[in-house]
Amino acid sequence: MSTTQTLPERTRILVVGAGFAGLGTAIKLDEAGRTDFVVVDKGDTVGGTWRDNTYPGAACDVPSQLYSFSFAPNPNWSRSFSPQPEIHAYLQDVAQRAGVLDRFFFGTSVEDAVWDETDQTWTVTTTAGTVVADVVISGSGGLSEPKNPEIKGIEGFTGEIFHTARWNHEVDLTGKRVAVIGTGASAIQVIPEIAKQVAHLDVYQRTAPWVMPRHDRSYTAIERLGFKLVPGLQKLYRTAIYWGRETYVPAFTWQPKILAPVQAIAEGNIKKGISDPELRAKVTPDFQMGCKRILISNTYYPALAQDNVEVITDGIAEITPTGIVTRDGVARDIDVLIVATGFYTTDQPIAHHIKGREGRTLGDVWAEHGMASYKGTTTSGFPNLFQIVGANTGLGHSSMVFIIESQIAYILSALEQMEAGGITAVEPTLAAQEAWTEDMQRRMKRTVWSTGGCASWYLDEHGRNTTLWPRTTFAFRGLLRNFDLDKYEVTTRTTGTTDDK
Ligand code: N01
């Protein structure tokens, strides 16, 4: 970790973010023999979302074996679904072993980035100074900027208030009256943990989620020894889980009816965890399973059934200095308010600070047409900007690490081709980007995310799903195997002119 070095004023490649995406990119650049890159991150260690989300109960709902780099298997996973501290420790260990940390500048937030057409470079302003880079690779994450709810009176609440993704560990919840707003993936992990500790917990549910049983277990000593000693064993586990997960894709994308028996299992999960018919009815979703992310937990429903927990579905009218008033006029006082209200997804604040050709920001472009890209990685009007986990790359069924590694390979292929051809700038042609986006939206039409009868963070304000990948992950990998220069406008060093390849 760079503690004494100052951020260079000039670099060939600037990588933003030190989560799975930024760290993976740094390792692959290093393996390619490159020393012409730096990584900046606002935090103080690698880990990204797994550094920032430290709420009680934080864990991965994707199996551990898939939730690691293909080039750095982790024989030390303790469970089939890893808890947050293990994932964070894994990433720190991978970074250490790869020997790349001397290129990382922590405590460095990007404030804006502006494309300079004359110099064919990005000028990036950070909290630690300005860097000029030929290429920017953004790995800042699709779910990294917490979104607080806009509820009347929230600013005037006088108790403790914090977001799950910025947990305040200095607040002791023991014996307190606590409210959680939201019942998404973060909330269902945190609620069972804090319900054990608080005097009383109000859970404000706007939409009930579908929650499946969590088939989690500790790995046995024999399995763990096997992961260390038996070549290929971990790969076998990983491959089996990977292909098992790929079979979910048809159900999400063109046969949502297949999900009916799975929905019956989730209904059974409600019955198992809750005996009160009124509470069961309250927490039973009114939309088709899969429309929102399918959650997994064995402890969520039993926690809601505890005597010290109340599920409130009446809708929040306002927040007062001492509590929450629902639309039926009932006021409930609380000491601590925890907002588990998710993240900026299709309207990320940083997009308004990335200025491409003709001074237009990504935010301006997306406000007009929705989040769009070519292959989830590059954007017309934003030369030499590669976005890992860009538009339509998210997954509801498998591991984002697979997507991230596919994008890293594509970007490295781009760099190779640029350098071999004396190319100073690449950006996708508008035609290529539009064809790609049209294909994404056409495929979205019959998916459960569009037809399942719910509102979700997958959709933008126009109801377009610009966040999820609607095909198999191996299709994604195949499409990004090589950088397809023929779909790009290029500027060459010799001519300085832009050609439509
Ligand atoms: O956020 P969410 P999250 N008033 O947006 C409610 C990943 N993740 O942090 O459904 C009242 O899903 C909102 O209600 P509704 C994963 O991809 C992964 O939980 O919009 N309520 C919802 O209940 C996940 O999908 C893991 O009606 C309001 C909740 O807040 C993504 O992160 C773990 C409200 C927000 O749920 C986001 O999950 C955790 C308001 N004004 C997260 N605004 C893993 O295990 C929002 N809500 C890998």
Image: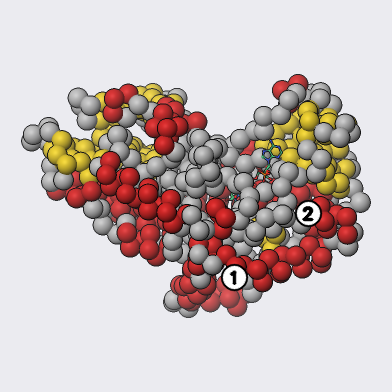
Given the current orientation, which residue lies at the most extreme left position? Answer: 494
* Quarter of the figure that contains the C terminus: top left
Which is nearer the eye, 10 or 313?
313
Position above or below: 500 against 62: above
Query: Identity of the amino acid at label 1?
Result: Ile
Residue of label 2 = 283
Find residue 62 and report its horizontal and vertical position in percent.
Answer: 57, 61
Displayed-image quarter of ligand 1: top right
Quadrant for residue 299, please give it. bottom right
| Residue in the image at 47% along x and 76% along y | 236
Given the current orientation, which residue lies at the most extreme top position? Answer: 156
Find residue 289 and report its horizontal and vertical position in percent.
Answer: 64, 60
- Label for residue 191? none
State the SS at label 2: helix
Which is nearer the eye, 52 or 472?
472
Please state the total of marks drawn on the protein image.
2
Find residue 14 and report its horizontal and vertical position in percent.
Answer: 33, 37
| Residue in the image at 88% along x and 55% along y | 278
State the SS at label 1: helix
Position above or below: 435 against 44: below
Residue of label 1 = 258
**Is 295 left or right of 37, judged from the image as shown?**
right
Query: Identity of the amino acid at label 2?
Result: Val
